[in-house]
Image (spheres, grey):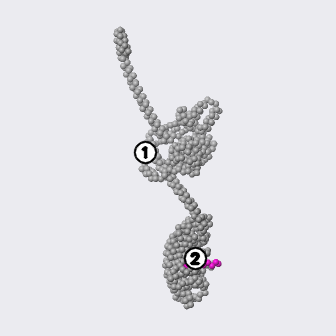
Amino acid sequence: MIPGKYRSVSGRAANNVNCGLHLVIQTSSLPEKNKVEFKLNKDTSSFPGRLLQHDLERNYSSRQGDHINLVSSSLSSFPILQRSSEEKILYSDRLSLERQKLTVCPIINGEDHLRLLNFQHNFITRIQNISNLQKLISLDLYDNQIEEISGLSTLRCLRVLLLGKNRIKKISNLENLKSLDVLDLHGNQITKIENINHLCELRVLNLARNFLSHVDNLNGLDSLTELNLRHNQITFVRDVDNLPCLQHLFLSFNNISSFDSVSCLADSSSLSDITFDGNPIAQESWYKHTVLQNMMQLRQLDMKRITEEERRMASVLAKKEEEKKRESHKQSLLKEKKRLTINNVARQWDLQQQRVANIATNEDRKDSDSAQDPCQIDGSTLSAFPEETGPLDSGLNNALQGLSVIDTYLVEVDGDTLSLYGSGALESLDRNWSVQTSGMITTVSFTFIEFDEIVHVLPKLKIKFPNSLHLKFKETNLVMLQQFNALAQLRRVDQLTIDPQGNPVVNFTLWKYYVLFRLSHFSMQKINGTEVTQNDMIMAERLFGILAHVASSELPQYRLISILGDARKKQFRYLLESKGKKPGIINEENNDSKRLVGENTNRATLNYTTRDFYNEKLEEVKEKKKFCKTYIEDLVKEATEINMKNEALQKLWPQMFIELVRDAVIEIRNKNSYMKLCLQQITDQK
């Protein structure tokens, strides 16, 4: 198709013998003299005679000198058309009133047989006085001043309606034109496609050069084969995929900027020719490949035939694009799953905290009259933890059961960061991590996990991820400074991030100084993103140095050794043996020992015992107390019995002594008899 011309269907030549009517009409006064060609592909039996192409051209293009008289009437404000007998015979079924400077439609009497009527290039403002032309097939009102479509309700045979280059603002009053084949409304002021769904036989629709911003409401146009929408303000297209016969769609010079706004075109199986030139989308590098990827049935794009090589390249790119989409979809699903899992873990965490708070409240009420002293185990002071033996509230229990169908923990590796959400994620540390992954991890983040549970896996963390230097804690219930003692068992920590949310210990004024003091052997560089200075280290030593001294000096030697463990027993004994040596030698040896062992011995006495470990120790203490009590009771019972026997012996002894003396005197009173008796006993024993 040649740019600048509007051609129906596929622009077949005029010598197509299947055409019942060919109509060529001058549509513009531009220098290139553009023409609009319409073809009525209907059975010729519907016409009383065959109308040839040259007859129409002579009548509609070159016959501006027809002998037509417009006579004024005193009875009407409209002129009356009069034609000679020769004119009526020669052009019995057609009439051209082109360029007659008409402002109204004249009264046409005695011409009921007219089939083609031309009012091109006049000044007509309203369609009227043609209702009697009920056999009219083609009506051409191109280049007038018509503002409303009207006066056509009786023209039920009309198949070509040309209203281009007028002032029409709305498509209306076409209800009775159900046989319409061509509708040309280009060059008007139409802003919306409407009131044409009943035109089931319409094949050509021209809405070029209007004010359309979108395309929709095309349902029902089952015969439409060509749709011209050039030179509008269209940003998106809909319903085109519902046109089963559409072959040619012209969208040149609009505001289409993405293929998504015209994605319905990909679902059309009949489209073979389409234009997007003059749109922002046509300036993109991916434009042609994207169109061909989604519309493989196209034969022409922007008036250029599509080659097999272009189709092949588009197919290859389509496969790559599909892979990208699948990967993107997969990532989106993983991202959504991550979000839902984290939300679920957060809900479970809140329920757990609420449950613990309720249990603690109940315990406080029970123990309000009696205060329990803190227990001291292994040199560290621990507060008694309430035992979680109370029944769960039914609402909380139901909520937990409802959440059990969703993942309750999440393990994520993102670059050099390992993120653990929920207590179940701690089990991932038992996996067989690859050497590459474990060596790459430098940051470990804990979220919605009790710190006491984290303490149990710190030795695994040190082994599995030897290069982890940065620890992050969010919603981990860090509530006291003692808990930081547990981090001393790690290999190395350069950065520590404690989120204020869910970690009340951050509200303590001196918590950072305590961390620096207790973990001084790590030479920490940042805490919560803030650089650690030398002044901070000095202040930490001044504030908490006495604490380590008291902890190590007030405990017996055997208690210190049990606290320090096997790793530091040698160091501690070495420090004890170093007493009495010269100060310089002692300091030098201490520095060497510190470099070897790492953690300062005094600070090592500041330990943290988790709640579970404390409960185990508490049970152990209870067992020992029970054993000691039983043992003491047995000892007391045995001592009481011995004392009672002693008292009874003291009472019986005088009488027993008298009887013993008496028996001895009686036996040796007859010395000879006694000696014989003794000899006899000796002889009997032999």
The residue lying toward the viewer, choosing from 368 and 596, is 596
Image quarter of the C terminus: top left
Q: Nearer the viewer, residue 501 or 111?
A: 111
Q: Is residue 125 visible?
A: no
Crowd around label 1: few <14 · some 14–19 · many ≥20 (10 Å): few
Q: Position of residue 650 (x, y in %)?
A: 38, 20
Q: Which mark is residue 390?
A: 1
Tell me what residue is drawn at x 51 percent, y 85 percent: 48
Relative horizontal placement of residue 655, taking residue 3 as reference (left or right):
left
Q: Position of residue 675 (x, y in %)?
A: 36, 10
Magenta portion: prevailing SS class? strand
Q: Secondary structure at mark 2?
A: loop
Give the CA distance from mark 1 to mark 2: 87 Å
Magenta region: 31-40
Q: Based on the picture, tell me whether residue 428 belongs to the magenta stretch.
A: no
Using the image, tell me which numbered label, if any, was put on residue 660: none
- Residue 176 in the image: state x and y as whole percent: 49, 78
Residue 558: x and y in percent read 53, 32
**Callouts 1 and 2 close, C-beta under 8 Å:** no
Residue 481 falls in which quadrant of the image? top right
Element under disc 1: loop
> Does residue 675 sit above or below 205 in this rendering?
above
Q: Earlier in the sequence, mark 1 or mark 2?
A: 2
What residue is shown with label 2?
A: 11
Residue 252 in the image: above or below residue 462: below
Residue at 53 percent of width and 76 percent of height: 203
Q: What is the total number of numbered labels drawn onto the structure image?
A: 2
Q: Identify the amino acid type marked 2.
A: Gly
Q: Nearer the viewer, mark 1 or mark 2?
A: 2
